């Protein structure tokens, strides 16, 4: 997908009403792409961005949205699966309903939208799918276990998909952002059940996550990377972006598990809790 073809290209971005998705939609629009963005609820169009209603958790909603898109354009050149949710909660305090809710959006929602778009990309023997994962896929972060797990599942799925659709001229990539200054923590769902035994762990984990987001980078950096991937002739599978996005995967691979455990527990303030309980 080269730069002089931009005017002919259509990009569909899920979760484009806020955060990284909204900024990404604007970046593509500014570069001359035909941009279709989606949100769970109908919102007004932005400059250069046509907004559509889409609930990625609903088969019928996905079917209707894709039909609406294809009534507007001949083809979808680029799909950015950005829609996602954050959930804060200790594992034992999180209900199965809450677990299903996280995976329904972060994993099954991606599968649902991708499966609806793939037949049309295969027909044209061309296309690009960019899934937005997270650096949390590399680390089971205390206090957001099921968010991390959903992004880990997305990573494995994206890699397999990349190989399956390669013969049809479709490229698939995964973007794994670290912490960026968005509203994701404030918008997160929170486990309703609490166990006082976990008060200190929960508090330390949540404070660490909030501090990390507060020091996060400019989400424009993620948007520009997504644009770069869309324009690259032969994109890589995995792209990390943000603080720690390069060295955390290396540490995960190179360090002994016990050493990595110590670093993680220290980073989340869990070593202090252990000392207090002795």
Image (cartoon, rainbow, N blue to C red):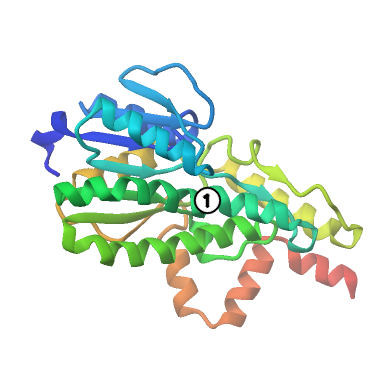
Q: Is residue 229 above or below residue 272?
A: above
Quarter residue 202 falls in: bottom right
Mark 1, other Cα within 10 Å: few <14 / some 14–19 / many ≥20? many
The answer, for residue 218, to whether it is visible in the render is no
Q: Secondary structure at mark 1?
A: helix
Q: Residue, x 56% and y 65% (percent of image)?
A: 139
Q: Is residue 139 above or below residue 19?
A: below
Residue 109 image point, x, y percent: 49, 48
Q: Residue, x 46% and y 59% (percent of image)?
A: 154
Residue 209 image point, x, y percent: 64, 50
Q: Is residue 191 left or right of residue 62?
A: right
Residue 114 image point, x, y percent: 37, 49
- Identify the residue position indicated by label 1 in the image: 106
Looking at the image, the residue that sits furthest to the left is 4
Residue 78 image point, x, y percent: 26, 42
Q: Is residue 232 above or below residue 150?
A: above
Q: Residue, x 36% and y 38% (percent of image)?
A: 223
Quarter containing the C terminus: bottom right
Q: Is residue 210 left or right of residue 133?
A: right
Quarter containing the N terminus: top left
């Amino acid at each position: 997908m080269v730069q002089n073809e931009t005017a002919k290209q259509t990009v569909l971005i899920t979760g484009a009403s806020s955060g990284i998705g909204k900024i990404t939609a604007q970046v593509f629009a500014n570069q001359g792409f035909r941009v279709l963005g989606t949100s769970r609820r109908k919102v007004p169009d932005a400059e250069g961005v046509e907004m559509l209603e889409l609930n990625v958790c609903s088969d019928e909603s996905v079917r209707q949205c894709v039909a609406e898109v294809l009534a507007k354009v001949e083809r979808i050149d680029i799909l950015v699966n950005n829609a996602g949710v954050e959930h804060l909660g200790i594992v034992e305090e999180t209900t199965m309903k809450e677990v299903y809710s996280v995976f329904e959006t972060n994993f099954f929602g991606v599968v649902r939208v991708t499966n609806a778009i793939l037949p049309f990309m295969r027909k044209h023997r061309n296309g690009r799918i960019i899934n937005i994962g997270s650096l949390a896929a590399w680390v089971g972060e205390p206090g957001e276990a099921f968010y991390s797990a959903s992004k880990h599942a997305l990573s494995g799925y994206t890699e397999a998909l990349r190989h399956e659709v390669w013969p049809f001229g479709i490229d698939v990539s995964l973007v794994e952002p670290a912490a960026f200054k968005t509203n994701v923590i404030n918008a997160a769902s929170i486990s309703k059940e609490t166990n006082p035994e976990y008060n200190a762990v929960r508090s330390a984990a949540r404070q660490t996550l909030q501090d990390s987001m507060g020091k996060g980078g400019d989400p424009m950096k993620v948007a520009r990377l997504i644009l770069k991937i869309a324009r690259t002739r032969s994109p890589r599978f995995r792209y990390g972006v943000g603080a720690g996005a390069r060295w955390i995967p290396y540490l995960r691979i190179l360090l002994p598990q016990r050493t990595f455990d110590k670093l993680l527990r220290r980073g989340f303030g869990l070593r202090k809790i252990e000392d207090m309980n002795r």
